[in-house]
Amino acid sequence: MDEIDRAIIRHLQQDGRLSNLALAERVNLTPAPCLRRVRRLEDQGVIRGYQAVVEPVALDQGFTVILEIDLAVYDRESVDNFETTMTGFAEVTELHRLFGTPDYYAHIATADLTAYESFLTEQVLTIPGIARVSSRFPMKKLKSPASAFGPDVA
Amino acid sequence: MDEIDRAIIRHLQQDGRLSNLALAERVNLTPAPCLRRVRRLEDQGVIRGYQAVVEPVALDQGFTVILEIDLAVYDRESVDNFETTMTGFAEVTELHRLFGTPDYYAHIATADLTAYESFLTEQVLTIPGIARVSSRFPMKKLKSPASAFGPDVA
DNA sequence: GGTGAAAGCTAGCCGGC
DNA sequence: GCCGGCTAGCTTTCACC
C-alpha cells in the first residue's frame, strides 16, 4: 500500500467509473500495472465495491431524520429482534448500537414529514420492547460521503 | 421514471461498474435503450455520480464517533466559520445543522481512540465559539449505505 | 512495471413499431 | 417517442518480456 495505491483509491472514490486507461494516466502508470493494483485492492477488500450515488429525492428519501431509540428490555432477544426489524426497513439508512445512552441511533429517510410520521408510528413504534424514541431534525446536510458530487438538491 | 428506470438505479447502486451490456440484460432491455436511460438519469441528476466504497480501516478511519456540538454564539459569523472549518476536516465524514438542540451533529472517523482524542482536542475544540461537545460511541454499525457489500471489517 | 494482440464494450446512426 | 440492430472505435485484459 504505497502512494500510488492511495492515489488510485482517491480517484476511484471521486469517480468510480473511471476507465482503467484514464486512471492509469492520472496515477502515472500504464494500464496493465494499474489494473493489477486495482484488482489487488479489490481482492484484499480495501475497495469493497462500487456504487451509483443517487439523488435521495428521486427515491422518495429526500427528508432525513435522526432518530434516537431506547429499549425497554435490553436482552438478547429484544436486541436481535429490534436490529433485524430495523435493518430490514428501506427507510432506515443508517443504524448504530451505542455504548451508553441512547441505545441506538438511526437515520430515517422518507419522502416528507407525513411519510416520516407514518413510518415512525406504524413501523418503528410497533416493534416490541421500545421504551422511547426521540427525533432530531436536520436543517441542513453540510457534509456526507456524497458531497463529492456537490450539495444535496434536497 | 418508470419501473425499468428504478431497476437500473437499483442495479447500479449495488454495482456501479456494471457494464451497459450486463445492465441491459438484467433489466430486460437491449444495450442501446439501456444506455440512453442511464445517460438520461445522469443528466437529470437522478444519478449524481459513482464512487468506490473503501474499507475505512485502510484509510485510518476505522474508528467512528458521533459528536454532538453546541455553539456558544449562534450568529452568522460563528456559524459560517464553524461549518467551513468542520467540513474541511477529512476526519469529519458527516455534518448536519439541526433544528433545536444540539446545534450540530457530526460523524468523526479516525484510526483509533488516541487519534480521536487528538483530533477533538487539537482541532475541534480550538474552533472559536464552541460551547460544548459530547461524544457518543458506536458499539456496532448495523446498517449503512455500504452494507450492500457486507458488514464492516471494523 | 511495460508491451502487444485478442476479446469485449461503448456509443452513435438508422430503420421499425 | 422509444426500442432494437448494426458498426466503428476504444477499452479491458492476458500472456510474455
Image: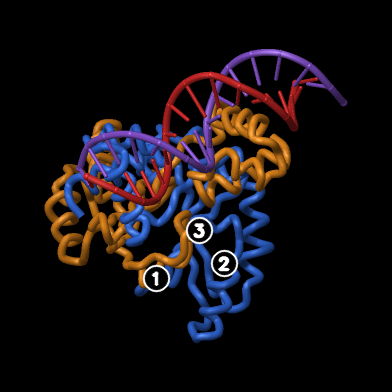
Chain colours: A blue, B orange, C purple, D red
Q: Residues within 10 Å of mark 1 (few under 14, many from 20)?
A: some
Marks 3/1: CA distance?
16 Å
Marks 2/1: CA distance?
14 Å
Residue at 32% in and 57% down: A46
Query: Would residue A140 be seen by someone viewing this image from the given angle?
Result: no
Give the residue type at disc 2: Met
**Chain letter behind tag 3:** B
Mark 2 = which residue?
A86
Q: Position of residue B139 (x, y in %)?
A: 36, 72
> Which image quadrant is residue B12 in?
top right
> Which image quadrant is residue B29 in?
top right
Camera-nearest residue between A27 and A153: A27
Q: Quadrant of the N terminus of chain A?
A: bottom left
**Chain letter behind tag 1:** B
Camera-nearest residue between B11 and C7: C7
Horizontal side of residue A21 vs B29, given as left or right? left
Q: Position of residue A91 (x, y in %)?
A: 59, 55
- Whichever of callouts 3 and 1 sits on the residue coming sooner in the sequence is 1
Residue at 27% in and 45% down: A33
Mark 1 = which residue?
B140
Q: Residues within 10 Å of mark 3 (few under 14, many from 20)?
A: some
Horizontal side of residue B5 vs A96, given as left or right? right
Mark 3 = which residue?
B148
Vertical comparison of A100 with B135: above or below: below
> Which image quadrant is residue B31 in?
top right
Under tag 2, what secondary structure? helix
Q: Which mark is residue A95?
A: none
